[in-house]
Image (spheres, rainbow, N blue to C red):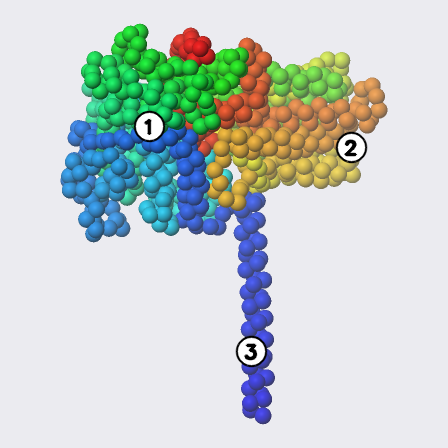
Amino acid sequence: MAPGRGRRDDSGAASRHVDQRAKARWFSGILQAGGDISVNVFGWDRRTPAAWADALAAEIAKHWQREYRLRLLGHPLSVRWRPADPELVQPWDSLAALVGTWPGRPDDLEGRWAAAPGELAGEKRLVDVLRRIPTRRLIVLGEPGTGKTILLVRLVLDLLSGAERTAGAPVPFLTSLSSWDPVQQELDDLLEQRLIVDFKGLHRRVAGGVHGRRRRCTLARALLQEHLVLPVLDGLDELPEHLRGMAVNRINEALGAGGRGLVLASRSAELRAALRPPDGIEADVAGAAGVELLPVPAVEVVEHLRNGAMGPAARARWEEVSARIRTGPTVVPAAAALTTPLMARMADVIYNPRHGELLSSVRRTPAELLDRRFATPDHVRNHLLDAFVPAAYRYLAPEDLRRRLRWLRFLARDLQVRRNVTELDWWRLGDAGPALLPGLLVGGLAAVLGIYGLRIPASAGIGLMAAVGGGLLGRRLFGAGSSMARALGGGLIGGVAGTVVAMLTFGAVQGTGPSLTGALAACITVGSMGGFRAGLLGAFAGGFAAVLTGRPEVTVFAPFVNGLGLGLGAGCAAVLARHAEPARGYHWSLTGLLTGLAAGLTMGLAAGLQAGPGRGLLLAVVTAVLGSVAGGLEAAPADTAALTGPALSLAGDRRTFWATGLAGGLAVGVSTGLGPRFPPGPGSDVSFGLRVGIANAVAVGLAFGFLRAAYGRYTVARAWLALRGDRLPRRLMRFLDEAHQRGVLRQNGARYEFAHQDVQERLARHPADCSEGHKRSRG
């Protein structure tokens, strides 16, 4: 019996074990579902920053491999460097001493650190230089066109190669500083913003924060705080002169006392002026060593160009130039000009046929570089810069080439003159058109619909106009600092408070319905004005004014007053909406959900006071559901850290525009269309409600779209510029992608840049030269 009982006991224990495992699986499934809800509803993510760093590394490597091939157009030109001027870097002995103060930083156990700055000289890979610096902080100096940016790209690729990077190691992130305002923004804030814009999913929230310093933060911020991002910063010299010293201070603040690495590129003179101002306080980039790029001998550049030509006939075209430079390098202006990778690339595009091209299609010959009209090296450089863009488009018809040159010149002038930056952000192009144009279009349409459909007491329009005035005053006093969801919450609270205060003060009850309806409209309207406090002030003024002027009768002027108020509110939303970054889709915002539910209760109360509890309950349910959808839709999480290029970034922003606009328009349109009936104008009760709903839906939907996404302003500006003098093409993204494929533009994440800052400057300041160069390139 004992064995039998033992077997039965064993089987019972096994059965209980199976049940426990099933319960454990069920419990883990519940936890996983809860984690998925936290990601998809609230934007939280439960994966570790190190896991995201590995996914980010793979995406960055794929992007820069493609970009490296496009920028080189062939084999790379060998670049040499020497140690930077000791006056621009910290003493070498202090670097190892600084590392000794960092917690958890190992000593130089393998003897990789250089013993002196002279050992940093070389011509192979910057990654070898970076590895030999104790602090892993490197400054790359060089004159214009010496190849700083392409060396940084190669550095990023080398750091991400299998031989260099281990799982969980810092990810190099290359970005430009040209549009950074270090007075208003810390370096980590800039990097966080760039990471979120360039990569899907990095705006997700990490529950619990990092190092106990934050309860919640974005994944991008978590990566920075865990030192899992190696900043590779290009273009310090492209900042305005008065900002460079502050930029160095911000960089030092970000480096802090920990072991964060850094790579910084700049022109030598600009960095010297920032670190050693004649009338200011001197500074250093903390713990940084440096190298300075050297000019490439012209003989090597010409040999590089000759060897890169396709076929014996194409190579033979360089013989005369090569011979002249070898025999008289000091007297030939082209010899002094052809000493940088930039000029080598310009000459390669202009004089060498590319894959699939016939030599006969390349009308220019390298021998023209020896022409007497190019009396100085600057004449040669300017000639190459002017001829580069027409040569990149030489296969197109003359009229197509002229149009593309006009579009490129406009973009270059916009970056150079209006914005003084080198980064071409598509979402910033919305400001290139007339500032008031979006407001005039949206406000005009809303006003026309309001005049036709809002045959209700004029108190609604008066309340909207008061809300706009109060919101603008609040924006002036408090700024525009918080999210739209918080502004909407402030608007709703202010609208209800203004209504109640007016009722208690003046004993007005007959205008309660329209005033509370106006409070919701004011809540939407003042979302464009600023943050929570601006919304609170504006909506309070709107609700107060609506109750104070509330009358049950509909006068002949009421539709015009209401149309003006609706147009003013929607127009202000379109004018004042500015976006520092594009939207990335949509997800649920808890604040927005609560705001929508509160709006439903408000509308239900208003309907119940005027039309009875039945209609009030119906309207409360409808508005709560639609309002929570409208208020809760924000930027969407993604499943990976996939890179978002300009076209994908625009597509995500466009989806956000239409989704949030549709949700907001339906919420307000349906709620006001089903709302308490005022004495209707001509027509049936159904047509009256339909007109009211359509007017509010279109106006509020457009306002929501403009507030939540950059697509609205971008589309208006692009259409205006395309119609007015053919300044931009109708299909702008297709044109920008073509320019990128031809090497005229380069891409970094969601942004484009011109092939070089000098190309941008020549297009912006010397359009006549470019046009003439274009004509000559056609023969």
Residue behind mark 2: 611
Label 2 or label 1, whichever lies nearer to me, is 1
Does residue 26 sit above or below 132 in this rendering?
A: below
Residue nearest the viewer, comparing 386 with 224: 386
Disc 3, SS:
helix
688 relative to 93, above or below: above
The mark total stands at 3
Distance of mark 2 from mark 1, alpha carbons?
A: 86 Å
Image position, residue 183 (x, y; %): 35, 26
Viewer-nearest of discs 3 and 2 = 3
Relative to the observer, which residue lies in front, 371 or 704?
Answer: 371
Direction right: furthest residue? 684
Q: Residue 307 carries which label?
A: 1
Q: Return the residue at label 3.
A: 13
Residue 757 relative to residue 506: left or right = left
Residue 61: which quarter of the image? top left
Q: Which of marks 1 and 3 is in front?
A: 1
Q: Is residue 82 above or below residue 337?
A: below
Question: Which residue does the image show at 56% across and 15% down from the upper left?
Answer: 722
Numbered disc 2: secondary structure: helix
Indicate left or right for 774 with 460 as reference.
left
Q: Quadrant of residue 593?
A: top right
Q: Visible in this render: residue 502?
A: no
Using a 10 Å C-alpha cutoff, classify the residue at mark 3 as few (fewer than 14 neighbours), some (14 to 19) or many (20 or more): few
Q: What residue type is labelled 3?
A: Ala
Q: Which of marks 3 and 2 is nearer the N terminus?
A: 3
Residue at image point 58% right, 92% down: 1
Position of residue 271 measured from the top left corner of the image (x, y, whole percent)? 25, 25
In the image, taking residue 267 as reference, residue 41 lies left or right, namely right
- How far apart in space, not on screen, are marks 1 and 3 (Cα)? 78 Å
